[in-house]
Image (tube, grey):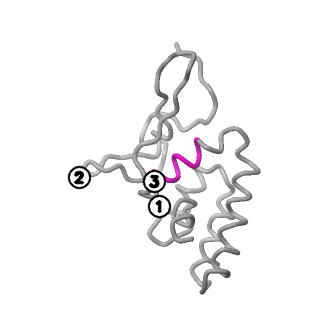
């Protein structure tokens, strides 16, 4: 449950609610409120009752981009490395969520506070090559 909360940006150790909301494209209020309720919840069932609806909201709004968004969120939470998606038509890897990354001195990507400063893109649709 702790790892699921971190991926969604609900855990205290996860990137800020603002970054998680932007990467997941969930309304910021949904993430902030779930994060606050989770902080005061105790026990596995109480914590699950806060995490599960947030996953359901993400699945409902993400559509075909769900896996891309989960890959970016998991990377921001420190659960796995940089996310990529294979694009068969171009036979290349598409870097996902670059707007949310910044390189730390140790070489590990960390969440950025504002995506416009980072450059890159964080869209979740197929793009045609130039």
First in residue order: circle 1 vs circle 2: 1
- Residues in magenta? 68-76
Q: Is residue 89 above or below residue 4?
A: above
Q: CA distance from mark 1 to mark 3?
A: 7 Å
Q: Whole-percent x and y of residue 75?
A: 45, 51
Quadrant of the rendered image containing residue 36? bottom right
70 sits to left or right of 64: left
Question: Front-most of 80 and 13?
Answer: 80
Question: Front-most of 3 and 12?
Answer: 3
Q: Is residue 115 above or below residue 35?
A: above
Residue found at x 69% / y 56%: 27
Local packing at callout 2 (Cα closer than 10 Å; few below 14, some 14-19, many 20+) is few
Q: CA distance from mark 1 to mark 2?
A: 17 Å
Residue found at x 64% / y 59%: 28
Task: Look at the magenta stretch and give its main secondary structure.
Answer: helix
Is residue 73 one of those drawn in magenta?
yes
Q: CA distance from mark 2 to mark 3?
A: 15 Å
Pointers 1 and 2 in contact (C-beta within 8 Å): no
Q: Which residue is mark 2?
A: 106
- Say what secondary structure mark 3 lies in: helix
């Amino acid at each position: 449950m702790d790892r699921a909360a971190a991926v969604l940006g609900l855990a205290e150790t996860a990137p800020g609610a603002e970054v998680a909301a932007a990467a997941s494209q969930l309304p910021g209020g949904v993430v902030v409120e779930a994060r606050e309720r989770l902080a005061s919840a105790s026990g596995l069932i109480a914590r699950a009752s806060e995490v599960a609806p947030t996953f359901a909201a993400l699945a409902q709004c993400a559509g075909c981009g769900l896996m891309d968004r989960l890959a970016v969120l998991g990377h921001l939470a420190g659960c796995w490395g940089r996310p990529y998606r294979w694009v068969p038509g171009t036979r290349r890897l598409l870097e996902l969520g670059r707007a949310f990354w910044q390189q730390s001195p140790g070489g590990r990507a960390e969440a950025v506070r504002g995506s416009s400063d980072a450059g890159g893109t964080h869209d979740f649709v197929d793009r045609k090559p130039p």
